[in-house]
Amino acid sequence: MEPKYKFRLYFLTALILVGFGTLLSRLHEFQINRKNEFQALVPGNRTVTIREPGIRGEITDRNGIPLARNLRNYVATLNLDEIVNAYHLQYDGIPTIQRLTNEAGLPRKTKDKDIVKIVNESTIVPLQQLSLAKNYNASALRTHYLTHRGLVPFTYRSDLTYEEFARIAERNLEFPGLTLSISPQRQYPYGTLASHVLGYLKQWEKGDITSADKRAYNHFIGDEKGIAGVEATMDSYLRGPEGIKTVLKDEKGRTVGMLDYTKPGIGAKVQLTIDARIQYLLENTLRRAGRAAGIVLDVRTGEVIAMASVPDYDPNAFIPSISSEKFKSYTTKPQLSPFTNRTITSFTPGSTMKVPTAIAGAMNGMATRSFSCEGFVPYGNHNIGCWLWNKSRGRHGSLTLPRALQQSCNPYFNKLANAIGWKAMVDGFSLVGLGKKTGIELPNEDPGILPGSRAWRAAVPGAVMTPALTAMLSIGQGDTMASPLQLAAMLAPIANGGKYYQPRIVKKVVAENGMVRISDFPKLEVDLLTSGIKESDLALIRLGMWKAVNEAGGTAGKVRMAKYEIAAKTGTAQTVDNGQKSNNSWVMSFAPFDQPRYAVVIMAQSAGSGGGVCGPLVNMVYSGIFAQEEGMRLPLKPQTEYAGHLERIEAIEPVKDVLAAIQATEAPASNSKPSKAPGDDLGETGNEIGDILPTTTPTTSTPVISPKPTITQETDREGQVIPRATPIQE
């Protein structure tokens, strides 16, 4: 065969093969990938799949007390197709409405059934006669009908009482298309208790539907999702397995029957580390301040026994959605910021940073070194003074580490910090978790600010750790920021002999079938005894904190108890609050001193001295905890919202009968200055801070803006089926 004919034959063969391949490719696309799409266009029966949400798992405290559960909720839903069919049988014509559609990019007028008018006439009017009707959003009903028709019921009422449910059930045959059902609805039985730990839910949105879901289901009903607290971080565990319903429809779109149904499953149970009764104790203690946060930590395991922040909010207000008016009430005053979990938000820590400064000094062999207090330390044109100098031009003279902690002497720690250098300070602070997130199972945790760290140098280009800034770091001023949780976690290895455990709020997670999804065991991060710190060094730090509470001249005398020995360190940090000079007041502590089990940290904003404001509060918490250990049952009941306030708290009166005091759900803040208890040092009622140097970053934390929740759809004009009351003119 001539070459030119061979070439033509090869070319023709190749063309046939390419064409055949293209044909196979198109057949695969039409018969496999787009099978359902084309089947839907062919007259005849077809199947429709509907996704239903799973049932959310429970959240309990460490003792099994339910903090988030599902209640039997009485619901009235409307099958809009059935209502239309019943209306058609009763009346000659179907009311219609004109609407604009978009076909091939061009607007077009079309007629559709006026579903709102049909529902109002056939269902709402009879319900009105029984006083069971309720205003609704008619626009939402129209959208639902266009999207789902009768495959997904429209929720008309989800707030039926049992009596209303029973009255409708007695006459259910009079309401074609109206279905009564019992469905699970989230409930937080103790109201605002642990609201910042638990978080709240938001309804699903169209944007939650993935491309895979769109291919798998004709109609999709999504799950509620957690957007704050443990509801958010444990969302994937709490969500139950989805339900799947397969329905057969005829060529006219009418439902023939149900082919298959897989019921929704129940999500895993999340057990928290918190003790609900100690949580109640801590929250009601903090309500004596306007804005405050508190932590109770088990120093042996890193478990958070209680975590509270005020002001607070009610997570029940978001079920199933929150009214715009209610949400506005939460966000009217940004400074109060009830959605901010202050326990994991950073604040200027003040003299509490003298403890990690002592740790850094111990790592560098300086725990037994003495330094002299001459009243102040000059840094250029600025002085950092001791509270004793600021108060009466006094000075402490030569101080050991324990006495410096007891007296909260600024010059001692300024000199110690510069003796070891800023790099050693940063290493010591980082070792005990400062300047970084602890990793607790909560969203929006603030890492704080550690001057000199890599993150700080990146955030403040060109900044240099001068001796002055190093001195400021040693006393928790300047750029330094830390959260109450970080301080509690930092304090734990001081109390327990050197072991830093990662703080945790989730004890364990168990699936409905019994499978353990998250196990209950502590996570050891650091052992200080393998990092250059000796047990004798830790003993010196513990001794200084013990002296601060139990010996004359200590700054934490108001923490002292008669029966139990407590160790503590106070802090009074200069800040700017709402444009005004203010203080953050602190007390961090651990107890019992000989065999520590608890670390308690309390911080109050816009307050006086740490010892005068937070000292009595810490005392109240320990009094309640030890009373429970001795057999006294702490109270527990639903909490109502505490709105807090912006007023300055100078001091808080000590409470004699603690158990009686915590029964109050809204204990008033005390602005009266308490009487001076024996052993209290004048420094704690004065200012621990000297001449403060300018900072390069703000000294107040930014309120956390949580994701916007589902706002309740307001009643519109067409859905206003119950006339509003007309005021009577006198």
Image (spheres, rainbow, N blue to C red):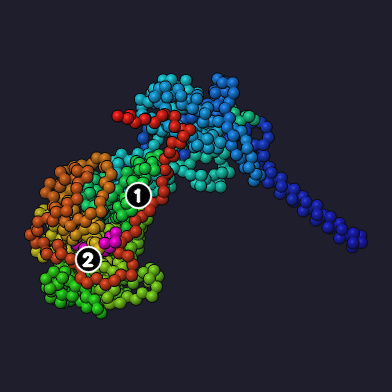
Q: Position of residue 87 (x, y in %)?
A: 54, 23
Q: Position of residue 356 (x, y in %)?
A: 25, 67
User: Residue type at mark 2?
Assistant: Ser
Q: Is residue 582 visible?
A: yes
Residue for badge 2: 351
Vertical order, 226 against 351 (above or below): above
**Chief secondary structure of the magenta portion:** strand
Residue for badge 1: 331
- Quarter of the image with the N terminus in it: bottom right
Of labels 1 and 2, earlier in sequence is 1
Front residue (pair 240, 594): 240
Can you name the residue that lies furthest to the right here? 2
Q: For marks 1 and 2, give the one nearer the viewer.
A: 1
The picture quadrant where one finds residue 564 is: bottom left
Q: Tell me the residue at 17%/60% (across/down).
A: 611
Residue 688 shown left or right of residue 313 in the figure: left
Front residue (pair 172, 485): 172
Can you name the residue that lies furthest to the left here? 678
Q: Position of residue 360 (x, y in %)?
A: 26, 71
Instruction: Identify the magenta region.
Output: 570-580
Q: Tell me the residue at 49%/27% (across/down).
A: 120
Q: Position of residue 186 (x, y in %)?
A: 37, 39
Q: Residues within 10 Å of mark 2 (few under 14, many from 20)?
A: many
Q: Is residue 65 visible?
A: no
Q: Tell me the residue at 48%/25% (across/down).
A: 123
The picture quadrant where one finds residue 498 is: bottom left
Q: Tell me the residue at 82%/54% (across/down).
A: 13
